[in-house]
Image: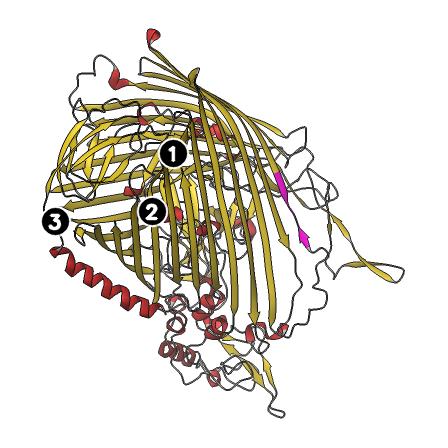
Amino acid sequence: MIASKTIKLSLFLCMLFLLFNSTYAQTGKINGTVKNEKGEPVEAASVQLSGTNKGALTNKAGVFSLQASPGDLLLISYIGYDTLRVKATASLNLVLHPSSSTLNDVVVIGYGTLRKKEVTGAIATVTAKDFQQGSITTPEQLIAGKVAGVSVTSNGGSPGAGSVIRIRGGASLNASNDPLIVIDGVPLSGNNIYGTSNPLSLVNPNDIESFTILKDAASTAIYGSRASNGVIIITTKKGLSGKPVFNFSTQLSVSTLAKEADVMSAGQFRAYVDSLGTGSFDNVHTYKSLLGNSNTDWQKEIYQSALSTDNNLSITGAFNNIPYRISVGYLNQDGILKTDNLQRVSAGISLSPRLLNNHLKIELNLKGAINHSRFANQGAIGNAAYFDPTQPIHAASPYGDYFEWANVDPNTNAVTLNKLAPRNPVAMLDLYHNLSDVQRSYGNISLDYSFPFLPQLHANINLGYDVAKGSGTVDVPTYAAQNFLDSGQHNRYSNSISNSVGEFYLNYNKTIQSIKSNINATAGYGYYNNLSTNYNYPFVRANGNIAPGSTPPVPFDKPENTLISYYGRLIYTYNARYILAASIRTDGSSRFSPSTRWGYFPSAAFTWRINQEGFLQNSKALSDLKLRLSYGVTGNQDGIYDYPYLAVYSSSDNSSKVQFGNTFYNMGTPSAYDAGIKWEQTASSNAGLDWGFFGNRLTGSVDVYYKKTKDLLNTIPIPAGSNFSSTILTNVGNLENKGVELVFNAIPVQNKHVSWSLSFNAAYNTNTITNLTATKDPSYPGTLTGNGVIQINSVGYNANAFYVYHQEYNKAGKPIEGVYEDVNGDGIINQNDLYRYKSPFPKFIFGFSTQFTFNRWSISTVLRANAGNYMYNGLATGALQANILNPLGYLANTLTDVLYTNFKFGQQQSDYYVQNASFLKMDNIGVAYDAGNIFHNKARLRISANCQNVFTVTKYTGLDPEIYGGIDNSLYPRPRIYVLGLNIQF
């Protein structure tokens, strides 16, 4: 199906490319006037021919003239007004309307907007023109490498895979470190939706206009309890005044495997087994006798070159002076792991009517998506590295005629599956059917009313929702080895979420010329309710029988939490150069007891626009110079379970019952609780300097920050008998983050034919745990994290530091098996010799973007780098002789590292496996051609080609050095993607 679409699309592209040269129209002069909503001429409004460098400015009378062709698309923009898109005619009379969020000059902040030059906090904005290009299926991928101090690490290469987003490192140990994401005024709860690996995969990136990232407490404190990890405000595309404009974009992409795990080939494997002699696993048969006659590259058998297509159509315009945007999208993405697929159908509508003589502004945004997925069994990835390469894919067997490790009774010929041997990777994919359907809709209606008798006063109400339903089935036949002992499976899963938002605030914005002052005051109320319904099902075998004891005691669970907020903010500006801002928010969460429910989160900031001082106002070189200082407190309550302050009893499963008379009852098990548990709180200080030179052709900023989180929500051990568990979630501990961020932007060349822009950002961040116990206890080693063995949180060290033995090496530089340094010098090697080593988190992150345009051609690239991060190569810990020649009667492949170390047995806690994972990646390189007007001036065509995941430079020996958390067990490989794109506007 996709192949036929590919051929048709390729022929269509070729036809368009051949036709465009013969379809240009003669160029003429277009004349027009531009006025504002009051009928006043707008001077210095920009009138630009879309997709070109051609443009003009209006004069004092609002008049302009421009060389263009009838039907060309013109973009008319002015600071503080919505951009107008119209098709050119010989004479134009145009009206611009004020905008609440003009992206070129206005920054969207919490509950309002500010002009960029008046921003008091550490805020970054990324608009559509700066997004990552290519095959982008989830929103967060658009800003990877684009913002200083913001890291976006994908969770792998599966279709629609999510990402870990961190802003200035993590502020917590046990609670969530994810930033708050707000889409068109609707905060996303982060609730898990069954049937999707990433809730953001139900958001179409093509609908997004901009990201605003709030990084310091001065900008985030207005969001209070949810803002310790920063805030990302996503603004979607809206309707624009003018005639309807249709925009159709389509992409065809091919994903390929960029790198394989370095395992032994069949030849290497045979030679290695032969070199180990004729040992026996059962005193009868030798290991050599287990070798097969095939040469199977299992990684090539499970991976494929995957085709994907992404199509989007939008209509933008105004109907009866009501701007609208309607969009639909269809994504069909195959994964490079066979049987993996994601299909998404999305739709959206945005209406922006203005009523009552523009006193009432309404924003209605509705978005929805339906995902249909088939999830591949990702266990095949690890098994492809371990499965014997001398065995065939298929063989006569009771397991669907796939080769599996089994024992045959010589007398009865009965076949018994080897329970602990790895399973055939191809069979794991072919015989596993995990199908899901997920529906999600979110949206809001915002009404902003300015009072006629006091136009500086606005009342705003925002009502929003986020609802979703996910369900799916997992089918594995009875004969499949992967579920053979369970007689296969025919299981199901489903849940739903229903989140609601209600906000109301008043804003007063008044300029008092007599005292050279501006007052901008906001006060509001917020209500946020998050409800999930998670259904519980028994384990059902492939034949439909329910496994004994698997019926859940309750059919569903309905976790729910509510947040109520009151907030206020005051921004005072004097003489357009001194700005003072202060905010306060108080949040009450149902997660905490009435005595600790309310948290208070203040902030204060000062900005000095130095370039407005008399001694700099006449500077021709300096266009901007601004000092920013801020301090604030934010909170955190996400990432923990609901109601940890209550004494909760959990019903046992059916394997634990108590008998009363002739009836067996499920037992109620008490959970540990802390009646006084409360908010985490993060106090943050920030100092920043923004600058611009030569008409802002050269801009940049530097920020220095310090964050301290106290009352960490931390799980700690407690004395036996003091509660209902040996551990408890409580408020214990402090964590510090400090860092520096640098941004540099430049436009070295900009003229009629050539333009070149570049952007560089760098960030340094380090964190230190300063306390983990209620009372000082120097003997307390810390809390084990990661896989429960290899990482630890300890006072005086980075979070999740590796907890390992110091490996000793021979004169040739090779590790000596089982020999470690006696770190404490007591003559005994034991757990007291484990030490904290390196960090999984980078100390430095870098991003670089550049675009060069020559006439109609443009080329762009994005590079990212991390430095100072280390990775535990968990896959390499299996490179052991004991795993290859398994005493349980099978052979297993492994990484070629075993040829170097010659390890016989496991050395999992050796620091040998903790490797430098610093890297440089070229995320994207692309070329685009603006073909201009086609079809007799009825449309414009743009063709692009991109390559993603171009190369990686690193010392790390594993598959990929970029895995959040620093433990590499078996990552779904990130593919290299080749993309051909086409955009038609008419």
SS under mark 3: loop
Q: Is residue 455 above or below residue 756?
A: above
Callout 1 secondary element? strand
Task: Give the residue furthest to the top.
Answer: 514
Query: Mark 3 or mark 2, which has the lower sequence index?
Result: 3
Residue 439 image point, x, y percent: 51, 53
Q: Furthest residue to the right?
A: 661
Which of marks 1 and 2 precedes in the sequence? Answer: 2
Q: Residues within 10 Å of mark 1 (few under 14, many from 20)?
A: many
Residue that numbered label 1 is attached to? 739
- The boundaries of the magenta stretch are 556-561
Along the line of sight, the residue nearer the viewer: 881 or 144 = 144
Residue where numbered disc 3 is placed: 25
Q: Residue at x 33, y 43 (%)?
A: 316
Q: Is residue 543 magenta?
A: no
**124 horizontally vs 768: left or right:** left
Crowding near the residue tagged with mark 3, few <14, some 14–19, many ≥20 C-alpha atoms within 10 Å: some
Q: Nearer the viewer, mark 3 or mark 1?
A: 3
Question: Badge 2 local density, few (<14 within 10 Å), some, or many (20+)?
Answer: many
Give the residue at mark 2. 315
| Quadrant holding the N terminus | bottom left
Tell me how far mark 3 sits from mark 2, CA to CA: 24 Å
Q: How many marks?
A: 3
Q: Depth check: 41 or 920 in front?
A: 41
**Badge 2 element:** strand
What's the amino acid at mark 3? Ala
